[in-house]
Amino acid sequence: MDAKLLLEGTEHQPRARAALGAALSSGPSHAYLFHGPRGAGKRAVARSFAAEILAVEAEDPYDARRRALLDPSPHPDLVWLAPRGAQHMVEEVRERVIRAASYRPFEGQRRVFVIEAAEAMREESQNALLKTLEEPPAYAYLILLTAEPESLLETVASRCQPIDFAPFPTPALEAALRREQGPAAAAEELVAAARLSAGDLDRARLLLSERGREIRAEAERLAGAAIGGETATAPWKQLLDSAQAAGEEAEAGTREALAEEASAGLKRPAREISEEAKRSARRRRTEILDLGLELTAAWLRDLVAVAAGAPEVIYNRDRLTQLRSQAASLSPAAARQAAELVQDTRRRLDLNVSEELALEALAYRLEATSSNG
């Protein structure tokens, strides 16, 4: 089996490269769990791995591989399942994976089923999938992708061969962004996006978008207002508004996708559609809000680095002037404590506390810490 295409997708993932290269040489297992942080390349590698599996014993291996690599793929034996909203629909998992796995290949000798964001499967879907994982047909191969393996049932995870993906190294992210953004991209902003992304290429791309720039500005405004004693201006509200707007967009997108499914014959009760759209909105709102807080914490950590005379390690490389100005009025100890307060608030939001009250309390705690420092 020619592993060239697969290995091109794993140049920054040595463990995944070794494991999948060995699998292509000796014959792949029937179930894999690709796990690692978002943006680590799991999706691209899964598509390449699926293409190699489908090329085996195909009448025209080159053409089978080529079609499998397209996104979306027209290959009839590659089934790719991604959640429409916050969760996978139970019936979709049953129809497109569990039942479909019992049908022989339309062409060639193999079928591949990829479940993206496997953690978004409900427990009912995971339990239903167990039999297929335990006793897959000889021609069926399943690849589950997840950034949250702890959210999967142990019975599901234990029946898959784990493939570990690490965060992308920052230099690799910078190189990828330069290729995508072109020579006109601002070099310092690109470096900052790579450093702030925590090894997540998708997040780095978001930070270079209009929405990403707005979230960065809102995070900096929250930190700056607290340090400057301007918390009474409610600097957290803009971050909340951005998160709310992102949630509303996600809800509208989910409703549109479900409406398209209905027009294609896959109808769902109105209540189910509404609940799924609302879950999608909550999930996206939470993601954006958490990103804003993470960026706030990164800003405060940068203040520590600047105050300590180590500007070379800061994340916000394109904001050095602003950082130096704020660091002049804040001790490193106070900035460090402030960053810890932000992380504590992120943990509190996981407990379903009021988002607005949590951010308001954070702002005043940051102001108190800054004034004492």
Image (tube, grey):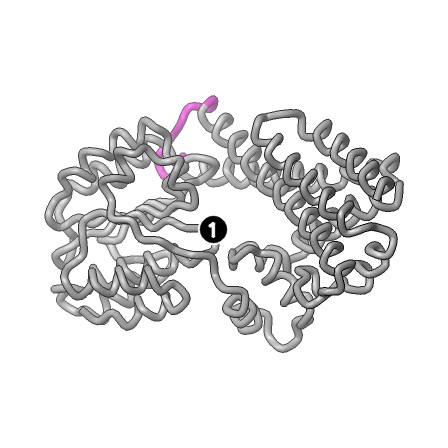
Q: Which residue is mark 1?
A: 38
Q: Main secondary structure of the magenta part?
A: loop
User: Quarter holding the N terminus?
Assistant: bottom left
Q: Is residue 268 magenta?
A: yes
**Does any portion of residue 65 appear in the rendered image?**
yes
Pinpoint residue 78: horizontal percent, then vertical percent. 26, 53
Q: Is residue 99 placed above or below 205 in the rendered structure?
A: above
Residue at the (51%, 26%) spot, across then down = 274
Residue 98 on the magenta segment = no
Residue range corresponding to the magenta coloring = 262-271
Q: Tell me residue 116's x, y (percent).
A: 37, 46
Q: Is residue 119 above or below residue 28?
A: above
Front residue of 298 and 338: 338
Q: Is residue 292 left or right of residue 144?
A: right
Residue 369 picture location, percent across and down:
80, 39
Q: Is residue 54 visible?
A: no
Is 20 displayed left or right of 152 in the figure? left
Q: Residue at x 18, y 49 (%)?
A: 30
Q: Is residue 100 left or right of residue 317?
A: left
> Where does the image place residue 367, in percent across and percent down from the top left?
83, 39
The image quarter containing residue 362 is: top right
Quadrant where the image shows the C terminus: top right
**Residue 22's quadrant in the figure?**
bottom left
For badge 1, the amino acid type reads Arg
Residue beneath the point at 57% across and 33% down: 282
Disc 1 residue crowd, few under 14, some 14–19, many 20+, Cα 10 Å? many
Residue at (49, 26) in percent of width and height: 275
Secondary structure beneath dot 1 equals loop
